[in-house]
Image (tube, rainbow, N blue to C red):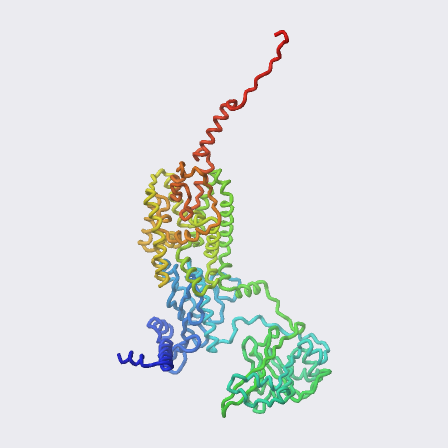
Amino acid sequence: MLYFSGMRALAGRGFGVFFGLLLLLCTGLALAEPPSALEKERIDSVLPGVSFISEQEGEFGVRTLKQGDEVVGYAFETINVAPIPAYSGKPMNMQVVLDPAGNILDNYVLYHDEPILLIGIPEQKLHDFAAKYQGIHVTQRVVIGRTKDESAVTIDAVSGATVTVMVVNEAVMTSAHKVAVSLGLVEPHADVKPKPSSIRMDLFEQKDWSTLTGDGSVRRLLLNYGQVDDAFVGTEAEGVDAAPADKRDNTFIDLYFADLTTPTIGRNILGDSQYERVMKELQPGDYMFGVMANGDFSFKGSGYVRGGIFDRIQLRQFGEVISFRDLDFYRLSDVYAAGMPDFHEMGIFIARAKYAVDPGSNLGFELLVRRQTGPIDSIFTSFELGYQWPEEYIERPVLTRAELAAIEEANRPLWLQVWYQKSFQVGVLLAALVVLVAILFMQDVLARRPKLLHRIRIGYLSFTVLFIGWYALGQISVVNVFAFTHAFMGDFKWDTFLIDPIMFIMWSFVAISILLWGRGVFCGWLCPFGALQELINEAARALKIKQYELPWAVHERLWAVKYIILLALFAISLDSIGTAEKFAEVEPFKTAITLHFMREWSFVLYAVILLVINIFTRKVYCRYICPLGAALAIPTQLRLFDWLKRRKECGTPCQLCAVECEVQAIHPDGHINANECHHCLDCQVTYYNDDRCPPLVAKKKRRQRTKAAPDAGEPQIIPAVQLDAST
């Protein structure tokens, strides 16, 4: 009571401050959450001597692991670094442990929401896969399956969960590299440096200063006092040592920068003898650069002392800083390029081989300017000058076809890598969908040839079960509907859906086919479990097993069951899509198609019961239970065309199609319910069959009667007879 009365007593800013402090405290407590028992157990398994585990620190929430005073490793969660959506549309979370050298000591899955793993594939297989990263360095490239990159580490995928493990790979290696860079364990971009180029030392051309500055061999950085002062605006050094208004346009520094290792640049600027003398002192892999300047600011600095570092200039390449010490500096007192101005400050700086300068890549020169903000405090700002060697001076390495292929492969986004790995399945599926479109557009022609249509349909249904279902794992589920709906309502990203090419192609085709034909194309031709049911029922009919149908009144009311199931699952998904995925086991798809009946007996029994019932009554599950069918029936109302033909006699008086429809999608009044139709085309076969369709039978009989008595309805010709006059 005292707490609440105190809260009521706070007002205005007082309440805001109190609430802000409370929120900050809660946030701090959340960030300071200690590692869980599972996280500690994994750390102890690879570093049993750890005596200290820090709180999560820094941008990526890294825990420092110590043994006494010695740092022996680092632990972090991938979801804090690279939250990459997986098959379920949600990121997985793994704890990765690194050693100080950047090697992965442990990788363990803390949490996942993968439907293919929640119930089905043993979770241990995922943990076994994650453990394969032990001993891999963060700069190495890891590929799932085969690759043309001979330098890459290859790991076999988990059968039936290729997309999931590829996301694991991307999340682990991306986050491990980012964390290692942030901790200084590896150099930035150490894993993406291109093959280095070399300078053409045999090439020399006489050039004057104007030509060297004009072709980019020498770059210029010109700053006035106003530009420098403006760079400190908004910092603590704003206004410190600022130039008076009348001096803002005066030259602060007029600096020129050039690579002097290149003969055409170095020999022209230094002269032959000075160039040769300095070059002899260089070690293999060293590069020398010239810096020349006029103005009030010294690039060397008055505070420079022997044994120290030049703190006013530095180079940067591939994100790595190249700094210079006293042993890297040579005085430059004489220059020889024609037309070269006089400089009051010049020097040669050596970038040692350890920096691995690449003349084939861009280089950045940075001039650092410092302003003192206190007795020992100061603020730096940098002015950058980009430098690129003229192409004529360098020789780029010739990459082999394998190297080019490896580079192309390494630069592919994750979803594109999956598409390449599944190129065979993608090609076959696209070809099959083209065939299906041809069947649908030629349905009137095929309906006039019942035996041919029946063979085509049985063959296509077999392909759907064997290839789309059991081989390519392309069984669409209502879970996919929920994943798309939640992504659309939240942070929609195409990458989430492109990561599984088979599902993406199937969903894209289903969306188009619903607009053109309705749900029937998927349910009647492309659903593997539906195709399996139909093939089993066809076999039962061939064996003369008696078929049973529910009375129309009962059948019509049972339609609503699947919509109720859909709404219930969707309501559950709003609270937890993981829970909805478990309840979505009302679909036997995972058991019968994805996992090939290889799972717990209860799931297998449920699927088998549905298939046994289907022997006596065609597609009972599809008609009354399937929430996916219900979900697809809703947008079917938007279809653009009615492809199935009807006659005015359909329903009144003719009931033949309604009786023969094996999923009872034709109402007694004759109209076809597109929400329930599976587009099997049986009614169209009857529509064109003049031996079965009553209106056509009647017309045929009339034609036959007419043919049997051809003169009955025609006028008779009376022959004319000429008479004699006498008669």
Which image quadrant is residue 59 in?
A: bottom left
Q: Is residue 130 left or right of residue 146?
A: left
Q: Is residue 323 left or right of residue 599?
A: right
Q: Residue at x 48, y 40 (%)?
A: 447
Tell me the quadrant of the picture where the C terminus can be found: top right
Q: Position of residue 616 (x, y in %)?
A: 34, 42
Outermost top residue:
726
Q: Position of residue 719 (x, y in %)?
A: 58, 16
Give the answer, above or below, for where 448 lies relative to 212: above
Give the answer, above or below, for where 596 lies relative to 104: above
Give the answer, above or below, for where 530 lies relative to 89: above
Q: Position of residue 19 (x, y in %)?
A: 36, 79
Q: Is residue 136 something that shows in the picture?
A: yes
Which image quadrant is residue 126 in?
A: bottom left
Q: Position of residue 430 (x, y in %)?
A: 50, 52
Q: Is residue 661 left or right of residue 308?
A: left
Give the answer, above or below, for where 721 lies relative to 419: above
Asked whether 112 or 107 is in front, the reply is: 112
Asked whether 58 or 164 is in front, the reply is: 58
Outermost left residue:
1
Tell me the quadrant of the picture where the N terminus can be found: bottom left
Q: How many marks?
A: 0
Q: Is residue 53 something that shows in the picture?
A: no
Asked whether 340 or 495 is in front, the reply is: 495
